[in-house]
Amino acid sequence: MTVTGWRSTHDLGLAVWFGGALMGAVAVNRAGEGEEAASTEGVAAHGWALWAPVNAMAIAAHLAGGAAVLADNAPRVAAQKGVMATTVAKLAVTAGALAATAYSGVLGSKVKLAASHKPSHREKAERHPIDLDSARRQLKIAQWAVPALTGTLVILNAWQGEQQRPAEQAGGILERARRMADLAS
């Protein structure tokens, strides 16, 4: 695949991850409002379960595309001032988004089981008891953290795109060389 193909895979994966998380936090979690809480959580849990395979594929595409783009840009990351910092920031935010996504999934499953009226769910929930109110609060925060973090990745992508402009590359490489020369002397 070409670098353009990998960059597109990276960006489309992120777009799906961000958009799905935002839609879920805004709409899926409120899909059953007006009904009793257990029903709302059941509707939301079902929606998230349907979304999970698509989300997993989007995240995998984002990560694979990102790895390919990073490999292609490795010389520029090493040579151009500021690119290493944005790359490290992007990796850290990606790790946070992955952690928030996984934590949301785990909490969502626990809340679904604990709030369910189904005997099989209640039995599973009793084996791993949770403070349901606390778990609901944590889940709400985690589910909003995912679009916040993936939105930050969109911004970092734009920043890195600006760093690829020829004038930015030349200036950044010259500045890095100047600093290295100063350190050597």
Image (cartoon, rainbow, N blue to C red):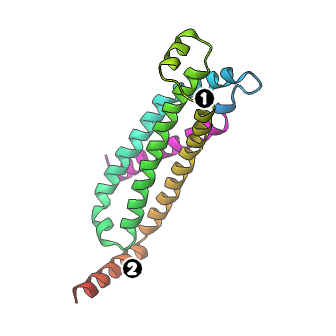
Residue lying at 38% horizontally and 45% vertically, measured from the top left: 63
Name the residue beneath numbered marker 1: 132
Amino acid type, mark 2: Gly
**Residue farthest to the top, as pictured:** 119
5 relative to 36, above or below = below
- Give the magenta range: 1-28
102 relative to 145, above or below = above
Amino acid type, mark 1: Leu
Q: Position of residue 148 (x, y in %)?
A: 57, 50
Element at badge 2? helix
**Residue farthest to the right, as pictured:** 34
Q: Position of residue 180 (x, y in %)?
A: 27, 81
Asked if the magenta segment contains residue 8, the reply would be: yes
Quick one: label 2, few (<14), some, or many (20+) residues within 10 Å?
Answer: some
Residue 171 numbered tag: 2
Quarter of the picture holding the C terminus: bottom left
Element at badge 1? helix
Could you tell me how far apart the alpha carbons at marks 2 and 1 are, in whole angstroms? 55 Å
Quadrant of residue 79 in the image?
A: bottom left
The earlier-in-sequence mark between 2 and 1 is 1
Asked if the magenta segment contains residue 146, the reply would be: no
Which is closer to the viewer, label 2 or label 1? 1
Which secondary structure class fits the magenta region best?
A: helix
Q: Position of residue 127 (x, y in %)?
A: 47, 19
